[in-house]
Image (cartoon, helix red, strand yellow):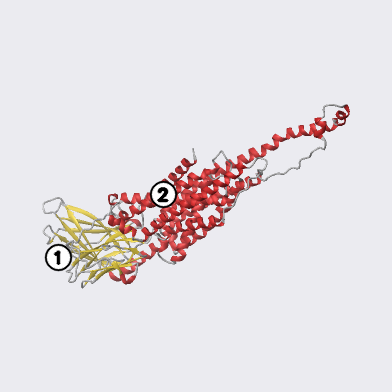
């Protein structure tokens, strides 16, 4: 397989595995910390505005917050804006003179790590109403747009690793010929350009939750180009244009250097080909372009928000560069080792071994910091999804380091095997003259012993030469084969690490998850006074349908009061022979706990329902309308501490 085809195959493999690793739904890093009014609260008077606070900064549009009345009418008095200049808090003013009833707040924002999130909550004025606004439970991201966005995003990660890694391999490791890597660098550049352009178009539908049919919507494109992720993508394209000029000039320089030895005569050619070090200005320009490309990722993702932003962005840039140099360099090393036309010098392999060791050291240091920043405490290691995925990544990295250790061992043996062995050549004075005389007995007799000695020496040399030459041909060849296999193992395990990393970047950090849960419990404990659930039912008989409204007060651990009211087909209060209510917490194997409702004359209720622990309970209500007709419905209700 030619080098370009091999390069394309590597890009396709990395991209496919990225997509497979990140094909699941994304759990964005930002989460709701607090809402005012609180979820499920019953207010005595109408609020002037609705405010939401998130765990990190969020991006908004004019209609990020939509407040709907019980009749499904918008009651926003203005556009959504950030509250008091805070990027993590948003608010929207409300109309004056809001009537009593239950209001629904539907919200949609973009978290700092560029993932859109959405949801809804309710609050009531005066008392809960019988009807509420209907809000569709659609996902925050359209599935088709999300799949296209993931493909482009992960292809960009794979491409930047190939581009930076292969270019660094050429500049630092200095192989005899860079020809096998031209296709790898070219493929990385083109894939990165194409994926970046695709991200610019897909970004709008991805944020708004619309399908791919709106890719060319001018309004969405304008919103993308004026957002921080859009600026980062435009900067990436500009840097790639500069990288193209840099790579072309670098390729011409390498071609000019390879032409010089061909003009020299074989007599003047040294046994060891001198490798020219790249000029400092070339290394500096390449380094600036690589750092700039890495910054376009850090500026648009999670490192740009949260705690210690400058340090986090620096760590993110170094982490991405170290990953690209190591794994992209492995792809370059593997491509070069499989080129049978020219063997890779052991010195080049040794240089990459040192480069890979430095990259691993940077990865470990930045990885430890990013793990601490994402977790925040030891409890989050095993109690959160982020922590468990991080443990899996650490295990994979340990395997990768083991494979790298084998590669370093074979690199050391290969370097020792190819050390030049200089043997002094013994030459007999006058042997050429004696051997060339073809007359005269004196000459013949005088050179007889010497000629015999020379013949014996030549004979001994001819017998030992194949044996001596077998070592530099067979042993290094075997060592090169072992090195190829160990490098291939590194590439395979490295791809697994990248897949796990992809899943990790789409998971809410443990620190944010724990903070959000604590904030929800604290806010609810101070604000929520009751939980109201409206459940439709239909027993299948004439007039045997309606709704049952269940009010659970206060909706927290301990004793609760329950009131269940039947609302008939005409919207009025109705009576039934029996209502049964039970609660089950399957995750803790608790229940069913019978509420023990009794007829209170117009409604069914109890004041002694005891729920022992917090969690999301399954509430089952059974409504009996006659001696033989009844129906059961279930709903999930959250019980707070």
* Residue at the extreme right: 442
| Mark drawn on residue 189 | none
Residue 323: tell me if it is visible. yes
Q: Quadrant of residue 222?
A: bottom left
Q: Which residue is drawn at 46% across and 60% down?
A: 316
In depth, the one of 152 and 65 nearer the eye is 152
Q: Which of marks 2 and 1 is nearer the N terminus?
A: 2
Is 142 on the left or on the right of 278, as rendered? left
* Residue 471: % across, % down: 67, 39
Image quadrant in which the C terminus is located? bottom left
* Residue 612: % across, % down: 32, 64
| Mark drawn on residue 601 | 1
Q: Give the secondary structure at mark 2.
A: helix
Q: Which residue is drawn at 12% across and 57% down?
A: 569
Identify whether 424 is placed above or below 608. above
In depth, the one of 226 and 395 nearer the eye is 226
Kindly identify which residue carries mark 2.
155
- Frontmost of labels 2 and 1 is 2
In depth, the one of 288 and 155 nearer the eye is 288
* Residue 169: % across, % down: 54, 50
Is 128 on the left or on the right of 170, as rendered? left
Is 203 on the left or on the right of 45, as rendered? right
Identify whether 337 is placed above or below 63. above
How many angstroms separate mark 2 from mark 1 (CA)?
66 Å
* Residue 417: % across, % down: 65, 44
Mark 2 closeness class: few <14, some 14–19, many ≥20 residues within 10 Å: many
Q: Give the secondary structure at mark 1.
A: loop
Residue 591: tell me if it is visible. no
């Amino acid at each position: 397989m030619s080098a370009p085809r091999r390069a394309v195959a590597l890009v396709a493999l990395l991209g496919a595995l990225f997509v497979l690793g990140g094909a699941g739904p994304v759990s964005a890093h930002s989460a709701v910390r607090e809402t005012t009014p609180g979820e499920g609260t019953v207010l005595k008077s109408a609020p002037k505005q609705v405010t939401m606070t998130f765990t990190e900064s969020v991006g908004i549009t004019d209609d990020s917050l939509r407040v709907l009345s019980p009749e499904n009418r918008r009651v926003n008095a203005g556009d959504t804006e950030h509250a008091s200049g805070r990027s993590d808090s948003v608010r929207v003013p409300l109309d004056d003179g809001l009537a009593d009833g239950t209001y629904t707040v539907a919200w949609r924002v973009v978290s700092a790590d560029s993932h859109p999130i959405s949801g809804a909550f309710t609050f009531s004025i005066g008392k809960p109403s019988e009807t509420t606004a209907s809000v569709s439970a659609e996902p925050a991201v359209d599935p088709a747009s999300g799949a296209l966005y993931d493909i482009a995003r992960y292809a960009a990660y794979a491409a930047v690793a190939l581009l930076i890694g292969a270019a660094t391999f050429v500049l630092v490791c200095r192989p005899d010929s860079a020809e096998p890597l031209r296709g790898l660098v070219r493929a990385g550049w083109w894939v990165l350009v194409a994926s970046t352009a695709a991200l610019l178009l897909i970004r709008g539908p991805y944020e708004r939750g619309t399908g791919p049919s709106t890719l060319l919507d001018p309004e969405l494109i304008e919103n993308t180009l004026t957002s921080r992720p859009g600026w980062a993508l435009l900067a990436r394209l500009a840097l790639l244009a500069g990288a193209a000029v840099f790579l072309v000039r670098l390729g011409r320089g390498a071609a000019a250097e390879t032409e010089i030895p061909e003009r020299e005569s074989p007599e003047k050619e040294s046994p060891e080909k001198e490798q020219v070090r790249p000029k400092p200005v070339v290394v500096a320009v390449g380094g600036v372009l690589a750092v700039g490309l890495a910054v376009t990722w850090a500026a648009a993702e999670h490192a740009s928000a949260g705690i210690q932003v400058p340090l986090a962005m620096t760590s993110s840039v170094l982490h991405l560069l170290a990953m690209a140099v190591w794994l992209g360099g492995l792809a370059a090393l593997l491509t070069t080792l499989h080129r049978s036309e020219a063997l890779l010098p052991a010195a080049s392999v040794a240089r990459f071994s040192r480069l890979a060791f430095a990259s691993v050291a940077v990865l470990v240091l930045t990885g430890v910091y990013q793990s601490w920043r994402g977790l925040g405490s030891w409890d989050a290691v095993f109690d959160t999804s982020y922590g468990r995925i991080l443990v899996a990544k650490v295990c994979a990295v340990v395997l990768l380091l083991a494979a790298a250790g084998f590669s370093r061992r074979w690199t050391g043996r290969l370097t020792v095997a190819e050390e030049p062995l200089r043997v002094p050549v013994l030459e007999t004075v006058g042997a050429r003259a004696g051997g060339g005389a073809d007359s005269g007995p004196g000459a013949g007799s005088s050179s007889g012993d010497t000629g015999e000695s020379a013949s014996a020496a030549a004979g001994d040399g001819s017998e030992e030469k194949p044996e001596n030459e077998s070592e530099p041909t067979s042993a290094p060849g075997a060592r090169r084969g072992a090195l190829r296999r160990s490098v291939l193992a590194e590439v395979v395990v490295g791809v697994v690490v990248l897949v796990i990393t992809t899943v990790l970047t789409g998971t809410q950090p443990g620190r944010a998850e724990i903070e959000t849960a604590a904030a929800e419990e604290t806010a609810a404990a101070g604000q929520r006074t009751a939980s109201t659930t409206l459940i439709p039912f239909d027993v299948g008989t004439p007039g045997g349908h309606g709704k049952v409204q269940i009010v659970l007060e206060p909706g927290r651990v301990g004793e609760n009061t329950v009131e269940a009211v039947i609302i008939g087909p005409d919207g009025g209060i109705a009576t039934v022979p029996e209502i049964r209510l039970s609660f089950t917490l399957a995750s803790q194997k608790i229940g069913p706990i019978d509420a023990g409702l009794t007829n209170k004359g117009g409604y069914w209720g109890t004041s002694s329902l005891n729920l022992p622990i917090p969690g999301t309970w399954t509430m089952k209500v059974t409504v009996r309308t006659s001696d033989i007709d009844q129906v059961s419905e279930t709903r999930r209700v959250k019980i707070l501490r």
